[in-house]
Amino acid sequence: MKQPVILIDGFSLVFRAYHALLYTGMQTHTGEPTFAVLSFANMISYLLETYKPEAIAVAFDTAAPTFRHEAFPEYKAHRDAFPDDLVPQLARIKTFLDLLGIPRIEMQGYEADDVIGTLAVQQADQGNSVLCVTSDKDYFQLVNDKIHVLRPGKDSYDVYEPATVREKFGVPPHQVADVLALMGDSSDNVPGVKGIGEKTALPLIKEYGTLETLYDALETVQRASVRKKLEESRSMAFLSKHLVTIDTRVPLQPESVHVRRTSPDYVGLDSLFEELGFTSLRSKYRTLAAGEGANRSNEIHNPGTDGFGSNQGPVHVSHTLQTLSDVEHSYTLVDTYEALDSMLNEFGTPDWLSVDLETTGLDAMQCRIVGIALCVTPGTSYYINVNDVDEQQTSPALFDTEVGTDGLPITAVINKLKILFHNPKVGKVGQNLKYDALVLRRYGITLEPFAFDSMLASYILDPDLPHNMDALAERLLQYKTIPITALIGEKRSSQKNMRDVDPTQVRDYAAEDADVALKLSLALRTELQNQGLETLAQTVEFPTAEVLVQIEYNGVFINKGALADLGEYMRAEAARLEQEIYTEAGEKFTINSPKQLGEILFDRMMLPGKKRNKTGYSTDVSVLTELAESYPIAQLVLDYRQVEKLRNTYVETLPKLIKSNTGRVHTSFNQTVAATGRLSSTDPNLQNIPVRTELGQQIRKAFVAQHPDHVIMSADYSQIELRIMAAMSQDANLLAAFKHGEDIHKATAAILFDVPIDAVTTEQRRIAKTTNFGIMYGQGAFGLSQRLGTSRQEAQEIIANYFAKYPGIRGFIDDTIRSTRERGYTTTLLGRRRYFPLINSNNKNLAAGAARACINTPIQGSASDMMKLAMIAVHRTMKQQGFKALMILQVHDELLFEVHRSEADELRTMVQTTMEQAMPLHNVPVVVETGVGESWYQAH
C-alpha cells in the first residue's frame, strides 16, 4: 500500500510537546531547557517509524499578520505570550527537522492551517492519501476520503475519517466551519455568536445545513432568545466563518509543493543528541543509521557491533522509556522468617542499603508500615510484607484504622533489621529518605548515616528541576516506574488503602522503588562528582536531612488555651474591621471576593490606580498598599486580610494539627523547594509567622515548653545575609562597620547622609536599612522607590550614592551578573549552584529578573548553607555531650530548643559558640544572639 503523505501542524505539536514534559523541567548542565525538544523528537520519530512516509512536511506559523488579522485585528489577541523557555527549544526543534531531512514550510500572511490545507488538497488531487497531524479541530473541515486528521491523544493517535468527525464532532466535515462560526473559539479569539455554544450550534447547523441558509431562514428559528442572539451577532457570525475557514488556495512557492523527505544527516543528529543529553534517541538513530547503511560521509567510525558503539536494535518510540517488563530484575517477596534470615545473610554488611517503606498514608508521625523494601544490588530487591497488629495493641493511639493480619509481625521484623539499620558502616540510601527514617524513628530505629538521597542529589545538581522519583527515572534512566494508581486505583474516592493491596503487587511496586532509588543514587553520585558537588551533598544536605528527622520527630508544644483566647479576640477584631469597611464603602459586600471588592473600590468609590486582570480589577497587596496612603478603606482591607489569614492559618488550625499520640505539632521540612537552599516547612508552615506585628507575637507566645521545668531557647544569626555580602564583596566600609560592632544600618546611614553615626535620625536609618536589603535583593530604582515611598528619581540618586560609597558591593554585583551570564549559574560560598538560563534572554524583563535573582542567590544560599552546617554541628555536639534538650524548630536564621531549666545556660553557651564557628567568614565576625523564655516570643 502506498504510504500516506504526512503534513504536520508545527506549533500544534510543539506546544503539545512543551506541556507533555514541562513537569520534568529537563535541561542541559548549561541550563538550556530541552524537555519540549525531546518530546517533539519522540513524536516525529513515532510518525516516521509507524507510517514510513516518503513525503512529509512541517508547516509553522510566522510572526507576520495574516489575512485574518486584517479582517479582525483582535484575532488571537488573547493568546498567552510565547513561553520564554520554549524560544531556544523551538530553534533546536527546527534544527532537528532540518537534520532529519523533513521540509519546513513557513509563509508570510498565512497560517500553517492554510499551508497544510492547500498541500493536502493538492496531494489528494494527485491521488495520494494525506494525514494532517494536529490537535486543532479546525482541520476537521478538510477531512474526506483522501484526507484524514491524525490527532494526538493521551496515549495514542486518533485517526479522524469522515465518519469519525461526524461521530465525535456531531456534523460531517463540510459543516464543521459553520458550527465553529456560531460557537466561536476563545483560544483564537474568534467571537462567534454571543451566548451560543456547542450545544446550540450543532442542532442549528444539523437542521439548516449552513450558516448562510440558517440566516436566510432566521425567522423560522423557534426559540426567540436564540433568534435574537443570531440577529444581534449576524456580522460577527459571518466574520467568524471567514476566520475559521481554512484557505486551500494559498499561492505556494513551487519548492514548497514538493514535500519529499531528503536523506538524514546522521552525524549532525548524533552531535545534536549528544549536546542535549538525549541518550536513548542517540542510540536509536545510531542504530537506524547503521541499518540504512549510511553513506561514508555520514558514518561515525567506532569499533562496536554496529559502527556506532551500540548493540541495541531499533526501539519503537512508545518504548523509549523502559518499564519493569523490559529490564532484568529479581524481586522477592519476604513473608517468612526463613526468607528474612536468608535475605539478611545474603546482604552481609553492604556499603549501601536502599530503603523504601510502604505505609498506610503520608503522615510520617501516624501512618503504619505495610512493608519494607530493601536493595543492595541494582536489579535485585526484596519486599518484606509486615503487619503491625502487635504494635497496634501496645500503642493504639498511633493508628487510625483497623489492622490486617497478613505478613510478618512488625516488631519481629524491626528487631531482625535493627542491626543492619543501626550499623554505621552501612550507608543508607533512598529517595526522600527523611520520610522513611522518620517513620522508622517511631519504631525505635535511628536510620543513619544517610549515604545518599537521590532527591537531594538532584536538587543539588539543579534546584529548579523536578526531583520526584518518576521524573528522575525518566530523565536519568529512561525508565517509567509503576504508578501508585496501578495498585490503589485512579479515582480518589474509590482508592484502596495500601494494606488492602495484594502483597505480590506491592512487592513489585515497592521493590522497584528501592531498586530505582539505588540506580538513581549511583548515577547521581557520578554526576555530583563530575560537577564538583559531592562534598556539598555529603557534608551539608545529607546530614541536614538526618537532623530534620529528629526535629520533626520532636515537634513543638502549643498552648491551646492561649490560642483559643487569641482566636476569640481575632474574630472580634475581624468583625470590627468588617463594619468599618462597610461604613467606608457605603454598603455591605463580600470582602473576601476580589471581584466585589474591585467593583466597590473602582466602580462605586472611583478610586485611582485600577488595574485589570482576567476576572476584574486587581485588589492584590501592591494595589491596596499604594491606595492605603490616601484611602482608609484600603488599609482596613489589608488589616482585615491579615487578621483572617493569621486566624485561619495558625490560630484555628494549629490545635487541629496536634498529634494524638504525642500531644505536639510536627511540621514537615522541605529541602528541595527553595532554589537558594533555604528550608521551608509545611503542615503547618511555621516559617511565616510574623515577628514584629502584634498578632504574630501573640501567636509566638503560644509556642511553649511541654513541661513546667522546661523553657524555650532561641539562637538567631544576627544580620547574617549582610555579613555574607560583606564577606563576598570585601567592601571596606561594610567590613569596618561589622568589625567595630556598629549598628549596620546606622553606619550605612552615617555614610550615605554624611553625618556622625550618633546623629543619624530614625528616618535616615529606615532609608539605609531599606536600601541595604534592597541592594542585596537586586532591587532597582522602581522597586526601591516603592519601598521607600519616594520618586523613582530620588531612589535612583540613593542607589547611585550607595554604590559610590560602597564600591566593593557594586563590583560584587557586576562580577556576579557577568559570571552568571558566562557560566549560566551562580554559586554560594560552599559551591551550591543555581542556574539562570533566562539571564541571556532576548526578553529584557526576563533577563533583568534573572539578574536580580542571581545577585541574591549567593548571599541567601550561603546563609542557608551556614545554618545547615550549624544545625549539623549543634545536633552532633548535643549527642556527644549528652544534652537532653530538644531541637524543635528551624526558622530562617533561627534555631529553637526546648530545654530543662538546669541545663539552659550550658546549652546556650554551646549553641552560640558552635553556630558562630560553623562557617567562618573572611574578615567578618559571625554573631549569634540567644535568648531564653517561657515562650518563643520571650526567647526571641
Image (cartoon, helix red, strand yellow):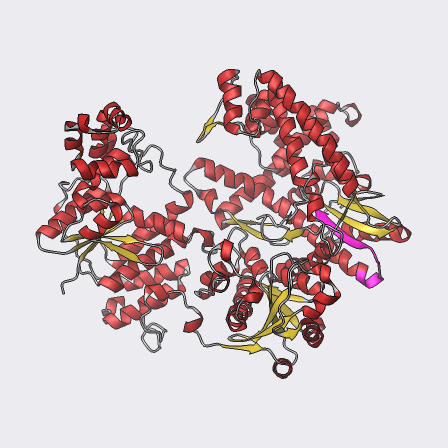
Q: Is residue 445 visible?
A: no
Q: Residue at x 84, y 61 (%)?
A: 881
Work out which residue is located at the far left of the displayed protein and give it: 126
Q: Quadrant of residue 28?
A: bottom left
Q: Where in the figure is residue 173, as x and y percent of width and height?
A: 18, 45
| Magenta stretch, residue numbers | 879-892
Question: Who is closer to the viewer here, 562 or 116?
Answer: 562
Q: Is residue 516 visible?
A: yes
Question: Who is closer to the viewer here, 546 or 333?
Answer: 333
**Vertical side of 416 occupied by 938: above or below:** above
Question: Who is closer to the viewer here, 559 or 382?
Answer: 559
Q: Quadrant of residue 47?
A: bottom left
The C terminus lies in quadrant: top right
**Vertical side of 694 occupied by 88: above or below:** below
Residue 164 left/right relative to 473: left
Residue 419 left/right relative to 139: right
Q: Residue at x 52, y 70 (%)?
A: 502
Q: Residue at x 61, y 35 (%)?
A: 775
**Vertical side of 518 occupied by 673: above or below:** above
Q: Where in the figure is residue 61, as x and y percent of width and height?
A: 26, 42
**Vertical side of 912 occupied by 397: above or below:** below
Question: Who is closer to the viewer here, 142 or 31?
Answer: 142
The N terminus lies in quadrant: bottom left
Residue 147 left/right relative to 319: left
Q: Where in the figure is residue 610, as x and y percent of width and height?
A: 49, 22
Assess whether residue 315 is covered by the magenta stretch: no
Q: Residue at x 35, y 36 (%)?
A: 79
Residue 518 left/right relative to 138: right
